[in-house]
Image (tube, rainbow, N blue to C red):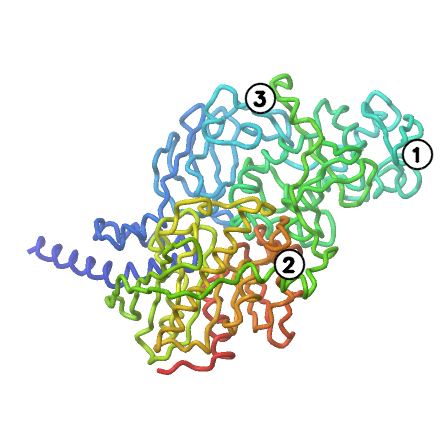
Amino acid sequence: MISGIRYIHRQVKIKWAKEQGIAQMESWFSDYSNVHAFQLGQQIKKYIPDDPHFLMLDALITRRFNIITDPEGADVYYKEYSHVKEEWILLGTTPLVNIEMPNVTFYRWKLEKQGHEAVYAATPTHMDTLFRTLHETGTVPEGMVYVEGIYPQTVSDFLSQQKNGFYIDKNEVTNQMFKEFMDQGGYQNPGFWQNEFILNDDTLTFDEAMVHFKDITGRPGPATWEAGDYPDEEENYPVNGISWHEAAAYAVYAKRSLPTLSHWQSAAGFLFQRWPPLYGSNVVPLSNMDGAGPEPVGSHAGISYFGANDMAGNVREWCWNMSPTERTILGGAWNDVSYMSTYRSQMPAFNRSPKNGFRCAVYSDRNRISEQIFLPAPARGNSRDYRSEEPASETEFQFYRKQFLYDKTNLNSQIEKRDESPEDWIMEKISFDAAYENERMIAYLFLPKGSVPPFQTVIFFPGGGALYQTSITQSISPKLHIDYILKNGRAVMFPIYKGTYERKGGSCDRSHPGESHQHTECLVKRVKDLSRSIDYLETREDIDTARLGYYGRSWGGRMGTIISAVEDRLKLSMLVIGGLSSSKRLPEADEFNFVPNVNIPVLMLNGKYDFIFPYELTVEPMFDNLGTPEQHKKLVLYDTDHIVPKSEIIKETLNWLDKYFGPVNK
């Protein structure tokens, strides 16, 4: 009797898992709710662990994760990064190997072992290992945290004997700490000032330099102080209004060092350069980057990869490296735009902006650090300021446009596969001749079951992940990005662009430097691929070719500027988390030269904290320079990073399609 009840109960659960559980899991995943999707997946796994659809979804949602400490035996606690006030959850004791965690999710960690200093950390789970060295109580320099090694860091670096770890201040140097330096003769003792004073190409003496380091009353001290003292009740605020020379002198006094660029970035950790999409909307909102001024150190909950406070915001921080008479400063200040938290600036060493502060480092073995680390900082790359640039003239644009022209030869098209099994659409896999090199193109055409032809049609261009995946099924397309368009009654054309998915193999499989001719060559082929796909759509009686729209996501959002400028058959454009490139391109491949020639209605959806497409640097100039009339372009900005909630994408894109294409034929 009992076994029969258990059997029936299990069958009910299996039915639930197949008919409801997977659909809900997929819905949460598509809306980037990976934690909820993962938790539900753990329940589903009990009943249908071998279901192919579940396994494909689970592989995208679940990450195998390792937590290792030296020595072993540390209790591991965790919670989601933004859930600051929630209780810590005990996960287990190190070593923890191959534990299952939600993929691409940001956590803060606490590692505790009796007799050792507690260690705090922050990391996304897309990294496969969190390694930390535990130090016996009292052996870590006061007020500092340990950093495992100089950036770039890998797990093998952590586990090697040459990891060359160092210490960095947990907090920025405070007013009270700097006052102690002053009270010990900081501005009178030349021994603390060990670097040449170069101002406007002149080398100053110590006495000549000290004239430049006065407070607002003319007394020695930071520019924001008065009568040689900091403002009342601000002893725990970061010292600010100081030059690089003052910061370097304090470091000598404290028997510490200004961190090099590499050491500072190492302390900030992977989250700066390895996974910026998660960094923005997690760290920045918990940092002082939208305030009226500096605030007490550590009063905001934003912590770095190694547990340091305020590495984003509060005050920006001087680093050692020069280039050639300027010095490096990082982290952004309380009133800087969000991308400045990861943006490296160069500033004259005598600059005493109220935004300027610093923290110190201690190197375990200075002799083991490569001298290259201390040399002038390398160029920041090809970062651009579009405010100082002018796009190409109409004559130049027309010249650039010609590279995308091709002879419209016979398509020789063939429907290679037709799948009518999905509930809401029919999928056709189509091949036809490309516009170059005797190649065959592949495209997937998704036709809605809920409307009647001719179908309004959206042509999709994916994100950069397409360069690394071998099939669109790896991103469970169309369910991840375009299912709602099909359910709404519109068709979607998904061309397989040169170098992506099934068309990998050759020089376009990877990204190329923007100013290379190889980049331009691949760009031209991909634009031709989209145009060739429209050629095919024009042969179909079930497609309304007067209502063709473009939908680009991330990489596709950037590509949309060029495509919408040169392809006249597109009647509207929807760009999700896209923007201009932050690096230089050859003029004929530079999106900025095409933007003014986009004249169709354009919808842009972007994240305020996106460090791939920073709003002020790449999104705003793109939107402002669009040739589209003001009343026909729209930019929606969200408090997110390189992710926009799918519910918002659905709402805005369907409204855009309805507005310019009208309702579908149900």
- In this view, 85 is above or below 530: above
**Element type at marker 3?**
loop
Residue 74 image position (x, y, % from top left): 43, 29
- In this view, 162 is above or below 284: above
The quadrant of the image that shows the N terminus is: bottom left
Q: Do the residues labelled 3 and 2 touch (CB within 8 Å)?
A: no
**Residue ID at (30%, 65%):** 428
**Snapshot quadrant of residue 202:** top right
Residue under label 3:
139
Q: What residue type is labelled 3?
A: Thr
Residue 368 image position (x, y, % from top left): 60, 18
Residue under label 1:
211
Query: Which numbered mark, 1 or 3, is in the foreground of this view?
Result: 1
Q: How far is mark 2 from mark 1, CA to CA? A: 46 Å
Identify which residue, 529 or 424, lies in the foreground: 529
Residue extending farthest to the left is 1
Residue under label 2:
592
Q: Are marks 2 and 1 in contact (CB under 8 Å)?
A: no
**Element type at marker 1?**
loop
**Callout 3: 10 Å neighbours few (<14), some, many (20+)?**
few
Q: Which of marks 1 and 3 is nearer the N terminus?
A: 3
Q: Which amino acid does label 1 sit on?
A: Val
Q: Earlier in the sequence, mark 2 or mark 1?
A: 1
**Residue ID at (26%, 62%):** 417
Q: What residue type is labelled 2?
A: Phe
Residue 171 image position (x, y, % from top left): 65, 37
**Residue ID at (72%, 56%):** 389
**Callout 1: 10 Å neighbours few (<14), some, many (20+)?**
few
Is 201 displayed left or right of 115 in the figure?
right
